[in-house]
Image (cartoon, helix red, strand yellow):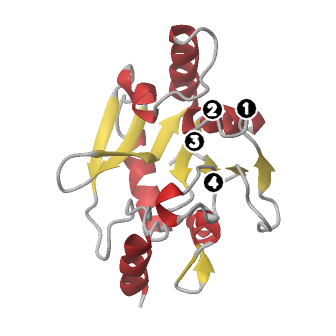
Amino acid sequence: MTAYAAVVLSGGAARRMGGVDKPARPVGGRPMLHRVLAAVADASERVVVGPAGPVPEGVRVTREEPPGGGPVAGAAAGLDLLDPGTTTVALLAADLPLLTPAAVAELRGALDGSTAGVACYVDGEGRRQQLCAVWRASALRAALDRLAAERGGTVDGAPVRGLLAGTTVREVSWSGSGPPPWFDCDTDEDVRRAEEWTR
């Protein structure tokens, strides 16, 4: 598989959790953000976009423009920080505490073995887990440029599904053992479920 970089999106208001710093919430004794960063420890570059607090050595932190501009603006900010020669980018939410290196490797392998621009997991109902994905950097740049052109030159507030709309998507069903790596924690109940899975 080709080398890859990782962009982890840690913004968001966490309204369903009362506005707490969601990526800092621990699951299995570690902040969710740190669990996601550990799943991409083999990436050539790791960038966190949004509020982050302390991060492991070598991880860079930036903010989307404008701050609070949403995940698409975050993807653009993260991509801007990567080495121009980067060919593959894992684009991940910071609230995926069950993500594993094996799950990221499966997405990378699925992308390498296809002509798609992005590989992402789908859940049991066939819903695309858009922020548990691996992109060809060229396809992500093209999607961001297309969305910006459609929205008067900005991706501020653009929906993530808009990124995938004009891109060939390789959908991947989780075939490994254990809990679904795309499980995201939007509520306190989600965090409780994730805790149970990590025991």
Give the residue at mark 3. 89
Q: Where in the figure is residue 141, as x and y percent of width and height?
A: 59, 23
Write the residue at 57% across / 64% down: 36
Label whose residue precedes the other's in the sequence (1 or 4): 4
Label whose residue precedes the other's in the sequence (3 or 2): 2
In the depicted view, which residue is nearer to us: 17 or 24?
17
Q: Where in the figure is residue 20, as x and y percent of width and height?
A: 61, 65
Q: Distance from label 3 to label 1 (Cα)? A: 22 Å
Quadrant in the rendering for residue 193: bottom left
Q: Distance from label 4 to label 2 (Cα)? A: 12 Å
In the depicted view, which residue is nearer to us: 170 or 128?
128
Q: Secondary structure at mark 1?
A: loop
Q: Secondary structure at mark 4?
A: loop
Label whose residue precedes the other's in the sequence (3 or 1): 1
Q: What label does residue 10 carry, if any?
A: 4
- Asked whether the viewer can see residue 103, the reply is yes
Q: What label does residue 66 carry, if any?
A: 1
Q: Are marks 3 and 1 in contact (CB under 8 Å)?
A: no
Q: What label does residue 194 carry, if any?
A: none
Q: Are marks 1 and 2 in contact (CB under 8 Å)?
A: yes
Q: Are marks 3 and 4 in contact (CB under 8 Å)?
A: no
Mark in the foreground, 1 or 2: 1
Give the residue at mark 2. 73
Quadrant showing the C terminus: bottom left
Q: Where in the figure is residue 29, as x and y percent of width and height?
A: 59, 86
Q: Distance from label 1 to label 4 (Cα)? A: 14 Å
Tell me the amino acid under the disc marked 4.
Ser
Q: Secondary structure at mark 2?
A: helix
Quadrant in the rendering for residue 154: top right
Q: Are marks 4 and 2 in contact (CB under 8 Å)?
A: no
Q: Residues within 10 Å of mark 4 (few under 14, many from 20)?
A: many
Q: Distance from label 1 to label 2 (Cα)? A: 8 Å
